[in-house]
Amino acid sequence: MNYQEQVEECVAFLKKCAPFSPELVIQLGTGLGNFAEKIDSELTLPYSELPHFPQSTVTSHSGNLIFGRLSGKKIAVLQGRFHFYEGYSTKQVAFPIRVLSLLGAKTLLVTNAAGGLNPLFKAGSIMVIRDHLNFLGENPLRGPNVDEWGPRFPDFSTPYHPGLIKTALDSATHCKINNVISGVYVCIPGPSLETPAETRWLRECGADAVGMSSVPEIIVARHAGMEVLGLSVVSNVNDPDNLEPIILEDIIATAEAMEPKLEQLLVEISRRL
């Protein structure tokens, strides 16, 4: 069975059991999975029960697709994601977004935890992504194009919807969340973290924060015509001249500490959509 057939089989499965076609998809990143408790859930499906879904091998990612309602919106929540470093292709990483786009979703809100590169950033900030750099060395659109899914050469002049960026910043002001900034996100393969030389280079490339996720999903979402908003929790700030060991547990702890503010922000953004 080829990739298109796998996607279509999963879409057919969800059409039979999902309570509705979601308007909004929210993908939860490292340390941010508890947000799922804030929605009025109508159906929870473990990834293991979904045809051809990859399985998350990262302990901080629960691995559930949840259908529910938030601020009156019909939403699907991806509680946990997949990563290129787990051994999946970017097509597999973005499989859930492709499926949900074909189920009718029009907007994607992505969250992740990232390392700060901009020296003006502070750990515990929330960065609204305004652009990205794909340094994975692979693109999920490589190979035969399915014309019904999107154009062969999709435009990426505005990968993140300007209106959604403004909504996020206005929502932060409304919620009195002061540590919200905007910047450029760079996605690297991982799982090894950046060396001092790599940190300097990524800064020089124009990146404000670095992570190992989200870009494949965003590329597929835009190919499918979805509007995209990305939010990164800045878990630490990398100083290449005084680089200290980066401990995964510390990254998760920072993301979890920021979760209440991010949840508040997500609720307000959803209300305004």
Image: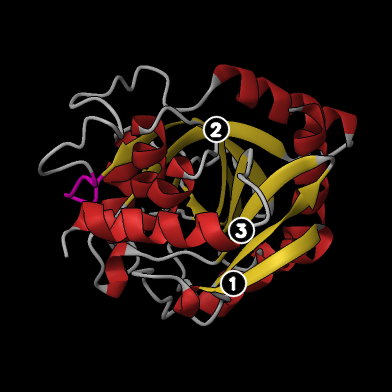
Q: Is residue 40 among what the camera can see?
A: yes
- Residue 115 in the image: state x and y as whole percent: 49, 55
- Residue 6 in the image: state x and y as whole percent: 28, 61
| C-alpha gap between disc 3 and disc 1 | 9 Å
Magenta span: 135-140
Q: Which mark is residue 106?
A: 2
Residue corresponding to mark 1: 45
Please name which of the two marks, 3 or 2, marks the residue nearer to the observer.
3
Q: What amino acid is labelled 2 in the image?
A: Lys
The one of 60 and 73 positioned closer to us in this rendering = 73
| C-alpha gap between disc 3 and disc 2 | 16 Å
The one of 255 and 111 positioned closer to us in this rendering = 111
Q: What amino acid is labelled 1 in the image?
A: Leu
Q: What amino acid is labelled 3 in the image?
A: Ala
Circle 2 Cα neighbour tier, 10 Å, few/some/many (<14 / 14–19 / ≥20):
some
Q: Which mark is residue 18?
A: 3
Q: As displayed, is residue 34 above or below residue 265? A: below
Query: Which residue occupies 34% across, 60% down?
Result: 9
Residue 27 relative to residue 206: left or right: right
Q: Tag 1's secondary structure?
A: strand
Instruction: Of the two numbered discs 3 and 1 on the same chain, state the one appearing first in sequence.
Output: 3
Instruction: Of the two numbered discs 3 and 2 on the same chain, state the one appearing first in sequence.
Output: 3
Query: Which residue occupies 82% across, 60% down?
Result: 38
Query: Which residue occupies 88% across, 29% down?
Result: 174
- Residue 20 in the image: state x and y as whole percent: 66, 49
Instruction: Of the two numbered discs 1 and 2 on the same chain, state the one appearing first in sequence.
Output: 1
